Amino acid sequence: ISYAVQRDNIVSAATFGLAEATQDPIPSSSSWAFDYAPYEYDPERARQLLEEAGVGDGFEMDIMPTTQYEESIRIAQVLQANLADIGIRANIQTLEWAQWLEEQGAGNFDTFVCSWNGLVDPDDYFYAQHKTGEVFTFTGYSNPTVDELLDEGRETQDAAARMPIYEQINSTIVDEAPYIYLYNPLNIHAYGTHVQGFEARPDQAVRFTETWIGN
């Protein structure tokens, strides 16, 4: 599926071009970015892999976006078209937010579309979503090697020593594709001249601890 996804088209449709297509989770503006991109758009390769998996004639699946985030619906529509090109018949099952959360939490989905935001440390991108048994591991992903690396990353304080740990975590997860990453948004901030002390951060997090309203 990752070989069949046209990420640039998804960026255009979902965010009207206000995002950066990516194949791994950490944005290029972060000092923890790895820019690991093993899946170029290659529908022929996608069809070959489906054939090798014994589903060369394709199959049917659901994509679950939510009305809470309209861009998730637009993402699902582009994915539906991309998957049709390789013989996968995708049905879009759009749910209200409360029902979406209930179905996701119960594991009642084939695939879903959503996002995370306000992430700073590399641990934020991986631990809760991929550590075996964690409450946010909605995909059921479990890899003992990744589990050990995630714990090691939390226990290591030196940034230089943490870098290769998270690089291995990143590449392993992208290769195994429990999630297929699509883009990172280019956040746009608008505020009045009376707002003081606010800074747009390169990690896209929003912090108001040093922000105040002036005269």
Image (cartoon, rainbow, N blue to C red):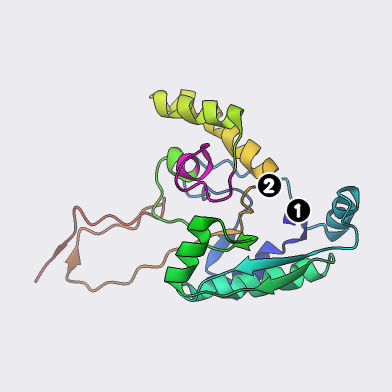
Residue 55's label in the rendered image is: none
Q: In which quarter of the image is residue 118?
A: bottom left
Measure how far apart labels 1 and 2 are at the Cα level.
7 Å
Please indicate whether residue 136 sits to the left or right of residue 140 in the image.
left
Residue 173 position within the rendered picture, expressed as x and y whole percent measured from the top left: 62, 41
Picture residue at 59% right of the left edge, 37% below the top: 142
Q: Name the residue carrying label 2.
A: 37
| Quadrant where the C terminus is found in the figure | bottom left
Please indicate whether residue 88 sits to the left or right of residue 191 in the image.
right
Query: Looking at numbered disc 1 in the image, what kind of residue is underneath it?
Result: Glu
Residue 13 position within the rendered picture, expressed as x and y whole percent measured from the top left: 61, 75
Q: Is residue 139 inside the magenta stretch?
A: yes
Magenta-highlighted residues: 126-140
Residue 39 position within the rendered picture, expressed as x and y whole percent measured from the top left: 74, 50
Residue 52 position within the rendered picture, expressed as x and y whole percent measured from the top left: 90, 48
**Label 1 with label 2: CB-CB less than 8 Å:** yes
> Secondary structure under badge 2?
loop
Magenta stretch secondary structure, dominant: loop
Q: Name the residue carrying label 1.
A: 40
Query: Looking at numbered disc 2 in the image, what kind of residue is underneath it?
Result: Ala
> Secondary structure under badge 1?
loop
- Residue 169 in the image: above or below residue 207: above
